[in-house]
Image (cartoon, rainbow, N blue to C red):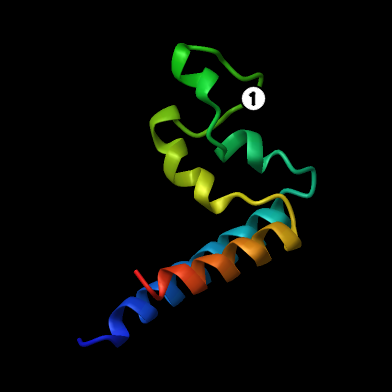
Amino acid sequence: MGPRFPRTATNIIVALTVVAWIVAALFDPTGKAGYVLGFIPARFSGSSMPFATAPAFLTPLTATLVHSGPIHIGFNMLILLWCGSQV
């Protein structure tokens, strides 16, 4: 595998995250994806949301796929590429 595997893995993670963001942006123009998939600590104490959400134990993972806009995901993916290829 050599030194190229970490960069390939980082590129795959970035691509999957961008695709997930595009799908969320296309199918959820209201922007509720952040509430449905986001990490909201109050949900672990039993608080309920007025709409269907992802199970609370999955939200640390699903929150990584939710971004608020193109600038947010752009800078996050830039930093992920920069830092991820070094790790």
Q: Is residue 41 above or below residue 15?
A: above
Secondary element under disc 1, as helix, strand or loop, is loop
**Could one spot residue 34 in this view of the protein?**
yes
Neighbour class for label 1 at 10 Å: few (<14), some, many (≥20)? few
Front-lying residue, 60 or 3: 3
* Residue for point 64% across, 25% down: 51
- Residue 33 occupies quadrant: top right
In this figure, what is the number of numbered marks? Answer: 1
Spot occupied by residue 3 in the image (x, y as percentages of width and height): 27, 86
- Closer to the camera in the image, 52 or 9: 9
Q: Position of residue 87 (x, y in %)?
A: 34, 69
Indicate the amino acid at tag 1. Phe
Q: Nearer the viewer, residue 27 or 45?
A: 45
Res 18 → quadrant: bottom right
Q: Is residue 80 left or right of residue 22?
A: left
The quadrant of the rendering that contains the N terminus is: bottom left
Instruction: Determine the residue positioned at 50% across, 73% down.
Output: 81
Does any portion of residue 19 appear in the rendered image?
no
Residue 27 image position (x, y, % from top left): 70, 53
Q: Residue at x 75, y 43 (%)?
A: 31
Instruction: Give the answer, above or below, for where 36 lies relative to 42.
Output: below
Residue 11, x across and y down, in percent: 45, 76
Q: Answer above or below: position of 21 versus 33.
A: below
Residue at 61 percent of width and 20 percent of height: 49
Q: Which residue is mark 1?
A: 51
Left or right relative to 29: residue 63:
left
